[in-house]
Every structure is written in structure tokens, then in C-alpha cells.
Amino acid sequence: MRVLERHTAGSPGDETVKWTNLKRHEIAELLNDEGIKVSVTVVDQLLDKHNFRKRKAVKTLATGESKEHRNEQFETIERLKKTYQSAGNPVMSMDTKKEN
């Protein structure tokens, strides 16, 4: 769906699933601006047909993690990265999620 191009992200666990942070009425309004008049019910059907899921863009802290120590892990990673690189070693970065 062209109107969702700038508002779409993909699922790392399932490449067939896409997310949007737009609300149904916002999508209907964008389509209306393109000259396509649809109801939110039709938007729901289109999102389902094209494997889109609703996702809020929210950043939360992990359970038990306090704000004052939040940056500590990133500082440690940066320190280790500089140490390894100065020794001539390559550094690879990976973002992983815990499997439930």
C-alpha cells in the first residue's frame, strides 16, 4: 500500500508480517487524500489482506532496569569495542531478542 511506505516496518521473526504505527482513520484519511474514499472497515480488511499489524512506537525500559543505570551497558560495549579495534580486531554488532 503506497500510503504506508513511510510508516512501515518489518518483523525480524516473520518476514511476511509488516507493522504500521498509523491509526485506521489516519490511513483512511491518507487514502482519501489520494482520491480513494474508504471506511475504516475497508482499511482493516486491506491491512489484514496485506499482513499488516498495528504497532505503537513506544520505548520502554526492560523489567528491573532503572534509568540511572540504563546507559551503563552501552558505555561498556563502546569501551570494549575501542579496545578490540585498537588491537586490530574486527567488531561485529548484533541486536538480538529473547525467545519466549
Image (spheres, rainbow, N blue to C red):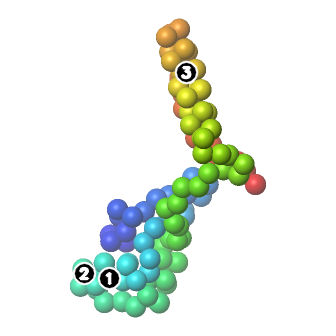
| Residue at horizontal 35 percent and vertical 62 percent from the top | 6
- Marks 3,2: beta carbons within 8 A: no
Q: Give the residue pinned by disc 3.
A: 79
Q: Give the residue pinned by disc 2.
A: 33
Residue 27: quarter of image: bottom left
* Quadrant showing the C terminus: bottom right
Three-letter code, disc 1:
Glu
Q: Give the residue pinned by disc 1.
A: 29
Three-letter code, disc 3:
Arg
| Residue at horizontal 33 percent and vertical 71 percent from the top | 3
Instruction: Estimate the spatial distance between the alpha carbons at disc 3 and disc 1, rounded to whole Å.
Output: 48 Å
Compared across the picture, whether 36 is left or right of 41 comes to left
| Residue at horizontal 43 percent and vertical 88 percent from the top | 40
- Crowding at mark 3 (Cα within 10 Å: few <14, some 14-19, many 20+): few
Above or below residue 96? Residue 89 is above
Above or below residue 34? Residue 74 is above
